[in-house]
Image: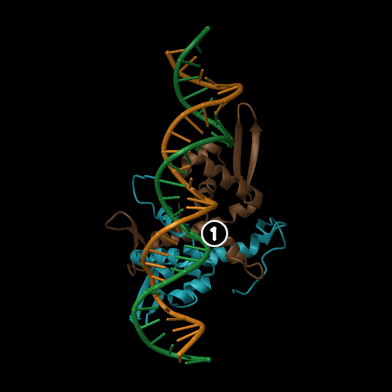
Chain colours: A cyan, B brown, C orange, D green
Amino acid sequence: MEQREFCPVHAAIQVLQEKWVLHIVRTLLEGPRGFNDLSRSVGGINPATLAVRLERLERMGLVSKTVHSYMPPRTTYTLTDAGVALHGVIGSIDAWGRRYLRVGAEGEPVCSGALSATKPTATT
Amino acid sequence: MEQREFCPVHAAIQVLQEKWVLHIVRTLLEGPRGFNDLSRSVGGINPATLAVRLERLERMGLVSKTVHSYMPPRTTYTLTDAGVALHGVIGSIDAWGRRYLRVGAEGEPVCSGALSATKPTATT
DNA sequence: TAAAGCGCTTGACCGTTCATAGCGCTATGT
DNA sequence: ACATAGCGCTATGAACGGTCAAGCGCTTTA
């Protein structure tokens, strides 16, 4: 867990592998959202976890939080430049998933090795 | 958690966000490893967790396990084609990390927004 | 007047991850 | 010849972190 000097790749992985982070970023790439809206778009995340994630991402400078009014509560979460830059990562994951992932017999995803080559597909 | 049809991106994220998976893949991209060797290279992972991850990744077809001898035990874990293909994802993460991540005041990583523009960086 | 929605927070659960120890056995060093 | 270290794991119990369900004060919609 301890390493002599700062390794950007390692640090990046540490952040991105946290549960829900990639889903949150992917959703936010589609545009700014409020808390509950974001929660619904991500799907299945519980508010406590979302709150913790957003706070961390904000402190890191990946996400910025804008409070439009306190009462009634109205807030907006947006990606910063660094956050938007993650679209490259999401893009790679997207490409890889489309190319290699199929749904297996038991419903869980499986890799299908060498199928028909790259087929241009539209993004969600 | 339930979704009407199979979404490759979502499924890919589900797999890759599992703790240690990206670290394992990244390490395995450097070449095949035995269990303890892999454990040491990844750094800080618990053997029980590693065993579970490897089993899942193998069942998914990302990693293949080769047993050279049962006694003395000698095993090798290698990436399949689908696994190797993840180097694109790792590459993106690498690029993003190098571009945006710095070590903050409290030791935790922080994003440094608009610095000097894109600078060609060599990959690990 | 009632109900639904906003952005969260709280507290009790429970599954995952952790540190640590150990198995049977061989290759190495002294 | 003997001790030690190494292999690939598995077994424990404790610690951590995510989950569920409910609810706060308040406004807007029905």
Q: Is residue A117 above or below residue B66?
A: below
A44 left or right, relative to A48: right
Find numbered disc 1 in the image and state the secondary structure of the residue it sits on: helix
Front one among D4 and B5: B5
Q: Is residue A26 above or below residue D5?
A: below
| Residue B45 image offset from top left, x and y in percent | 47, 44
The numbered mark 1 sits on a residue in which chain? Answer: B
Residue appearing at x 35%, y 51% in the figure? A6
| Residue type marked 1 | Gly
Q: Evaluate whether residue B110 shows in this view.
A: yes
Q: Quadrant of residue A62?
A: bottom left
Point out the residue furthest to the left here.
Answer: B105
Q: Quadrant of residue A81?
A: bottom left
Q: Quadrant of residue C12?
A: bottom left
Quadrant containing the N terminus of chain A is top left
| Residue A106 image offset from top left, x and y in percent | 70, 56
Front one among A118 and B79: B79
C7 left or right, relative to A87: left
Residue appearing at x 41%, y 64% in the figure? A53
Q: Is residue A3 above or below residue B92?
A: above
| Residue A73 image offset from top left, x and y in percent | 37, 80
Front one among A12 and C20: C20
For label 1, the residue is B88
Q: Evaluate whether residue A80 shows in this view.
A: no
Quadrant containing the C terminus of chain A is bottom right
| Residue B27 image offset from top left, x and y in percent | 51, 47
